[in-house]
């Protein structure tokens, strides 16, 4: 992993390397494959990635998923700088009917949980059979909402992280490792 990096006015230090990321990806994919092994072409798992942050995690995760699945995306935004606003400011909807379908929402990080609560409210209006949540990072200590997160890559303390899809003011997503704000 590289040394300290700077983005705009902030400095970040190495936090999680490629080996740990890949190990967690394989563990999560194995769980998903086992839990959804009864999927069929007529009844696939509908995986919904939350853009922009989940794109790297989702891309790497589905390379290990062997069950029948479809991949779709929605876009939401709740961050301003390094803090979550808790309010969804953008939502680009699905182009897929999810009525009576099994849904897996894939997120890069769950912080306070407010964004996920809003996403779940919107999704439930579309009458899916069930909805599960998968996130690479969960700031459990900061989460103010009751969420049943079925798949968690790593619980982290209340630290601002970038890399592996996560950004600071739209920069830093391209790093293959994760860095923490110093």
Image (cartoon, grey):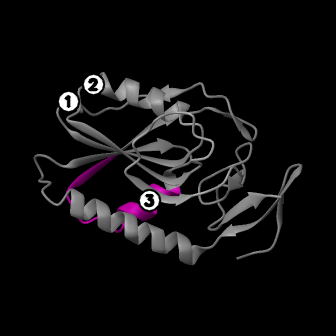
Q: Is residue 64 magenta?
A: yes
Q: Local crowd at mark 1 within 10 Å, few (<14), some, or many (≥20)?
A: some
Q: Is residue 19 left or right of residue 60?
A: right
- Is tag 3's residue or tag 1's residue first in the polypeptide sequence? 3
- Give the alpha-carbon distance from disc 3 to disc 1, as whole Å: 25 Å
- Point out the tag, 1 or 2, that comes first from the N-terminus: 1
Q: Quadrant of the N terminus?
A: bottom right
- Near mark 2 (Cα within 10 A), the count class, few <14, some 14-19 or many ≥20, is few
Q: Quadrant of the C terminus?
A: bottom right
At 53% across and 36% down in the image, what residue appears? 113
Of residues 12 and 150, which is closer to you in this image? Answer: 150
The residue labelled by disc 1 is: 99
- Quadrant of residue 174 in the image? bottom right
| Relative vertical location of residue 173 with respect to residue 90 in this rendering, above or below | below
**Residue at x-position 71% and y-position 52%:** 159
Q: Which dot, 3 or 1, sits closer to the camera? A: 1
Calculate the distance from the C-alpha at mark 1 to the C-alpha at mark 2. Answer: 6 Å
Residue 59 is marked as: 3
Whole-percent x, y for residue 2 in the image: 75, 75
Neighbour tally class for label 3: few under 14, some 14-19, many 20 plus, Cα within 10 Å: few
Marks 3 and 2: in contact by CB < 8 Å? no
Q: Which residues are magenta?
A: 56-71
User: Helix, strand or loop at disc 2?
Assistant: loop
Residue on which the image places disc 2: 126
Q: Secondary structure at mark 3?
A: helix
**Which residue is painted at 53% across and 32% down in the image?**
115
Q: CA distance from mark 2 to mark 3?
A: 25 Å
Judged from the image, the secondary structure of the residue bearing numbered disc 1 is: loop
| Image x and y of residue 49, in percent | 42, 45
> In the rendered structure, are the residues bearing label 1 and label 2 in contact, judged by CB atoms less than 8 Å apart?
yes
Q: Nearer the viewer, residue 148 or 179?
A: 148
């Amino acid at each position: 992993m590289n040394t300290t990096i700077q983005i705009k006015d902030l400095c970040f230090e190495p936090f999680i390397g490629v080996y740990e990321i890949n190990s967690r990806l394989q563990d999560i994919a194995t769980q998903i494959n086992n839990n959804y092994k009864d999927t069929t072409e007529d009844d696939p798992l509908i995986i919904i990635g939350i853009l922009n942050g989940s794109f790297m995690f989702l891309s790497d995760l589905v390379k290990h998923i062997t069950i029948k699945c479809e991949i779709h995306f929605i876009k939401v935004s709740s961050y301003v700088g390094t803090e979550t606003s808790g309010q969804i400011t953008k939502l680009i909807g699905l182009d897929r009917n999810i009525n009576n379908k099994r849904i897996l929402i894939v997120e890069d990080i769950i912080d306070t949980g407010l964004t996920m609560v809003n996403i779940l409210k919107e999704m439930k209006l579309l009458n899916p059979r069930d909805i599960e949540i998968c996130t690479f990072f969960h700031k459990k200590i900061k989460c103010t909402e009751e969420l049943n997160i079925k798949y968690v890559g790593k619980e982290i303390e209340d630290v601002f992280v970038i890399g592996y899809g996560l950004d600071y003011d739209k920069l830093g997503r391209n790093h293959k490792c994760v860095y923490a704000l110093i």
